[in-house]
Image (spheres, helix red, strand yellow):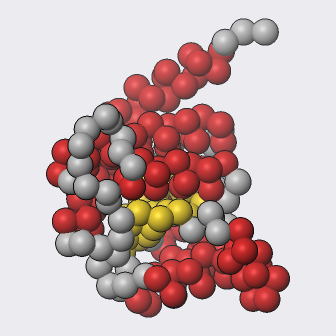
Amino acid sequence: MSLEHLGDLGRLAAMCAGELEQPVRRYAELVKETLAAGRTVFFAGNGGSAAHAQHIATEYVVRYRPVTRRAAPALALSTDSSLVTAAANDLGFESIFARQVEAHGRKGDLLVLVSTSGGSANLLRAAETAKRLGVRTVGLLAKGGGALGKLVDHAVIVPTDDTALAQEIQLAVDHFVCETVEPTL
């Protein structure tokens, strides 16, 4: 067994540091603008991307670095198991995030959709609902961005088809955004 994966990750990270600099910095600006306006940042994803969404929302509410600052309004839409299962059962799994965006999203909020495929029906529906409500959208994506990459207001597309590598880079991107945003809180 080799650690070839780490080498692949290092090469992809180096490539992304150059190629994704502007899209990542714009993503950070969108988060800053949203929080400065007193609005909320919502995160959504499926599976490992749901865990990512929860992790990053927590960084904003609690803290990323050990500094004293105000809590930032951020929420992962995958965390309420009663709501998610009721929506899936009563409305269909494709509605689990859109229903929450409809209930809580307001003009000026930001919805960050984390996906490696960019094709999940529930994320597409959430993006459509957000647009209708004036909620800005960011897609943190891979594999060319999929349909979601064309639907969101701003896309950060990791240039790989490897799900594991994409997820690792996506987390690094969100940690950079937290690092950039936190001093403004």
Residue occupying the point 62% across, 63% down: 79
Name the one closer to the observer, 121 or 149: 121
Residue at (47% x, 65% y) in the render: 75
Left or right placement of residue 85 versus residue 32 in this view: right
Q: Quadrant of residue 61?
A: bottom left
The C terminus lies in quadrant: bottom left
Instruction: Specify the quadrant of the image occupied by residue 166.
Output: top right
Residue at horizontal 46%, vertical 51%? Answer: 58
How many dots with numbers?
A: 0
Name which residue lies at 45% across and 29% down: 13
The single residue placed furthest to the front in the displayed view is 68
- Provide residue 40's location: percent of width, then percent of height: 36, 70
Q: Where, quadrant-wise, is the N terminus in this rendering?
A: top right
The location of residue 178, given as percent across then percent down, is: 33, 45
Residue 58 as seen in the image, left or right of residue 31: right
Residue farthest toward the right in the current orientation of the protein? 89
Percent position (x, y) of residue 131? Answer: 43, 84
Residue 72 screen position, x and y as percent: 32, 59
Residue 10 sits above or below residue 134 on the image: above
| Above or below: residue 115 compared with residue 89 | above
* Up-down relation of residue 57 to residue 102 (above or below): above
Pick whichever, 119 or 28, lies toward us.
28
